[in-house]
Image (cartoon, rainbow, N blue to C red):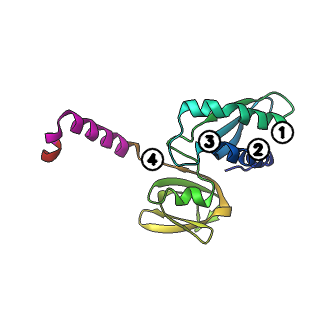
Amino acid sequence: MASTAVEEQLLAALEQEALQHDIDIVDVEVAGSKARPTVRVRIDVLDGTAIDMDRVCDETPWISGVVEALDPFENSYDLEVSSPGVDRPLRRAKDFAAHVGERAEIRSLEAIDNRRAWTGEIVEVANDEVHIMVDGTTYAVPLGKIKSAKLKPDYDAMLAAAKKATRIEEDPQDDDEA
């Protein structure tokens, strides 16, 4: 989630231009040193299909142009444009709603129910709150209090599913016996 004034400024300018390119600005982050910051822009396509590297490369010039026009830094900076990745950042209600049923990690700006961090399943988004289930307990985290949030894939489950799919392709009868 954009948390600094520069990140908010970049996000607003990029979102305005992105609609003309059928692109969703998933997140903007400024990281690294003040002497030479890195601007990370994560993008996706609006139609819900997965973005590929060719499309990321095609979109980079206009993104660079928007950042350059704002000229938000005294010195030079590095620009990284990428897909959201499997640990996709979540910042808007629609981002959380699109991933109901998936694991996420949420960090809050302040303690809520004596916690500042939750890792669990997104249950729903309602009344400007994200409901996340952690160890059988559901917590309501107001969207305005979220410092950062991202999908938290279960890599063990993903690996097991990939192995099972490979095994099925190699010998479909093995799946019936398992």
In the image, what residue occupies the spot 77% across and 33% down?
65
- Predominant secondary structure, magenta span: helix
Labels 3 and 2: the sequence-earlier one: 2
Spatial separation of the CA atoms under disc 4 and disc 1: 35 Å
Residue named by callout 2: 10
Spatial separation of the CA atoms under disc 1 and disc 2: 8 Å
| Residue type marked 3 | Ile
- Residue 3 is marked as none
Q: In the image, residue 11 lies at what x, y percent?
A: 73, 47
In the shown orientation, is residue 1 left or right of residue 4?
left
Above-or-below relation of 116 to 161: below
| Residue type marked 2 | Leu
Circle 1: is it few (<14), some (14-19), or many (20+) Cα within 10 Å? few
**SS for callout 2:** helix
> Tags 1 and 2 in contact by the CB under 8 Å rule?
yes
**SS for callout 3:** strand
Can residue 117 be seen from the camera position used here? no
Residue 160 located within the stretch drawn in magenta: yes
Labels 3 and 1: the sequence-earlier one: 3
Residue 103 located within the stretch drawn in magenta: no
Residue named by callout 1: 70
Can residue 8 be seen from the camera position used here? yes
Residue named by callout 3: 43
Circle 3: is it few (<14), some (14-19), or many (20+) Cα within 10 Å? many
Quadrant housing residue 38 = top right
In the shown orientation, is residue 27 left or right of residue 102?
right
Spatial separation of the CA atoms under disc 4 and disc 2: 28 Å
Spatial separation of the CA atoms under disc 3 and disc 1: 19 Å
Q: Mark 4 against mark 3, which lies toward the viewer?
A: 3
